[in-house]
Amino acid sequence: MDLRPYRLSAEQVRDGSLYLRYQPFVLSDDVQTGVAWSWLHGEDGGRTGTTGDWVCDRRADTPARWAAFADANARLRAMYDDWLDAIAAHSPGGSLLDVGSNDGYFPVGAELRGMRGCAGYDNPGFGTAFRLLNGVVGTRARFVGGMYDPVTHQIPGCRAGSYDVVSSSLVMCHLPDPLHFLAFLGRTARRGVFLYTGMADSDDYTVHYKEPNRFTPGVPFPHGFDNDTGLSRGLLYRSMEWMGFTEVVEVPRRATWLRGGVFEDNLKALLFLRQG
């Protein structure tokens, strides 16, 4: 999200560097934030500047790193904005819940596109980012400190049918209970579920995992299966159809999107819609 049209003050740029770090933001002509560069190069991958993996300051970093950082995050912004455009087009004026909302890019971006009553659920620490972002762009997206619990298969307090569209980007890949997670998304959404997720190129009904406890060391079986969880295409589509989401809109990969590393063709941006 390019925030330069809002003419952030020096204090807001400083706060943005602290709180709007993970998702891709342009804070000023000299400062950008976002995780895309580190996704491609690894944490500290070739870094020669002084502003960190998720923040780049043209005045402190090398010209080469600034150019690479800006390009990677522009590509991630292009992905996110294309997804939001598709969601808003299929649910004009509707509400969006983003599960794993992080800094608030999707709820705030949806409201900027005319959607209303948008919200995000995530770790309670992201509340400051939401307040900052809402204050800059003039939206009223709501942040709720609460995360999906794979033991109870829900977010506490999140009611069925609460939102028109529920979105989830690269969340299921960290969860041991992908079918229960899909069921939670499906019962929360009235109209559509947006997923950015990997899938096996197979019509079989299969779930795949990699070595457990990558992100949650010491968590006992079965909850430690947190690494690259994914479904086959057949199981994902059949699951969504079973819940009534019979129309599938794929947001096609574009040349402007991030490429390299994990961002290859097994990752799909899919909007599942109920008919009627």
Image (cartoon, rainbow, N blue to C red):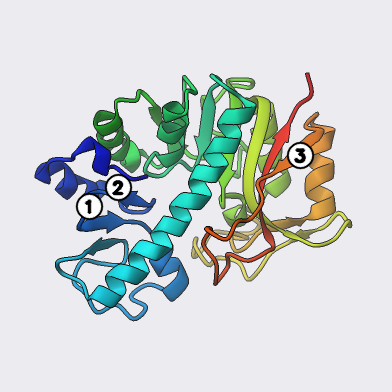
Rendered image: mark on residue 219: none
Which residue is identified by label 2?
20
Amino acid of disc 2: Leu
Amino acid of disc 3: Val
The answer to whether mark 2 and mark 3 are in CB contact below 8 A is no
Which residue is identified by label 1?
17
Residue 30: % across, % down:
20, 58
Q: Is residue 144 above or below residue 52?
A: above
Name which of mark 2 and mark 3 comes first in the sequence.
2
The answer to whether mark 3 and mark 1 are in CB contact below 8 A is no
Q: Badge 1 local density, few (<14 within 10 Å), some, or many (20+)?
A: many
Residue 248: % across, % down:
76, 39
**Residue 150 shows up from this direction:** yes
In the displayed structure, does residue 138 sit left or right of residue 10? right
Which residue is identified by label 3?
248
On the image, which quarter does residue 101 sit in?
Answer: top left
Judging depth in this view, the residue of 228 and 52 nearest the camera is: 52
**Disc 2 or disc 3, which is closer to the eye?**
3
Judging depth in this view, the residue of 136 and 39 nearest the camera is: 136
Name the residue located 58 percent from the left edge and 67 percent from the top edge: 262
On the image, which quarter does residue 164 sit in?
Answer: top right
| Secondary structure beneath label 3 | strand
In the displayed structure, does residue 245 sit left or right of residue 15? right
Q: Is residue 249 above or below residue 137?
A: below
**Residue 145 shows up from this direction:** no
In the displayed structure, does residue 15 sit left or right of residue 127? left
Amino acid of disc 1: Ser
| Secondary structure beneath label 1 | helix
The answer to whether mark 1 and mark 2 are in CB contact below 8 A is yes
Distance from disc 3 to disc 1, alpha carbons, whole Å, reads 37 Å
